Image: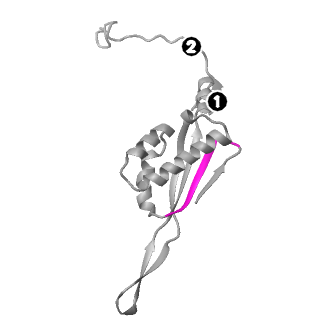
Amino acid sequence: MIKKRKKNLSTEVYALGQHICMSAHKARRGIDQIRRRSYEESLMILELMPYRACYPILKLVYSAAANASHNMSLNEANLVISKAEVNEGTAVKRLKPRARGRSYLIKRPTCHITVVLKDISLYKEFEEYMVYSKKSGLITKKKNKNLTCHDTYSSGGLWDKK
């Protein structure tokens, strides 16, 4: 079952997969590889990884991108996986018949996977116009400075000075 949510105030889009029948430890192997990567790069990584957990994660990343493009009309090229987490779900308990009329309990673990995509196009535009001063803690507009690049090798180098 896949639940879809979105945050109204920010440019984050969620996709939540619940009760996926695998252990959380095995699903974390795939999630750790795609965290803080772009949408297109994470799709390539998940398609080439040999783990069984990659298929449900791939479906969730597709679903979150579809939510972003349909619900919030965001471009898929600007999406980055900002948060991806795996939580343990309930264990499905089955009874296996054994000898002499006994039964043996089999626990099949489940997990809940959450994928959050964030649009970075707004942050790039914001960084072009603003700069953060660490000393004063203020955000100010960038000044247009014509910076010239000095080539140290053609000007005699750093160590040729007397």
70 or 161, nearer to the observer: 70
For the question of whether residue 136 can be seen, the reply is no
Q: Where is residue 123 in the image (x, y as percent from the top left)?
A: 60, 32
Give me the disc on residue 120: none
Q: Is mark 1 on a helix, strand or loop?
A: strand
Q: Residues within 10 Å of mark 1 (few under 14, many from 20)?
A: few
Give me the residue at 33% from left, 7% from top.
154
Q: Position of residue 96 (x, y in %)?
A: 41, 81
- Whether the magenta-drawn stretch holds residue 67 is answered as no
Mark with earlier residue (2, 1): 1
Q: Do the residues labelled 2 and 1 touch (CB within 8 Å)?
A: no
Q: Is residue 125 above or below residue 10?
A: above
Q: Where is residue 108 in the image (x, y as percent from the top left)?
A: 45, 71
Going by the numbered disc 2, the residue's amino acid type is Lys
Question: What residue is pinned by disc 1?
Answer: 139
The quarter of the rendered structure image containing the N terminus is: bottom right
| Residues shaded magenta | 9-20
Q: In this view, does 96 lie above or below 108?
A: below
Q: What element carries label 2?
A: loop
Q: CA gap, disc 2 to disc 1?
A: 18 Å
Q: Residues within 10 Å of mark 2 (few under 14, many from 20)?
A: few
How many discs mark residues in the rendered view? Answer: 2
Give me the residue at 53% from left, 39% from top.
80
Question: What residue is pinned by disc 2?
Answer: 145
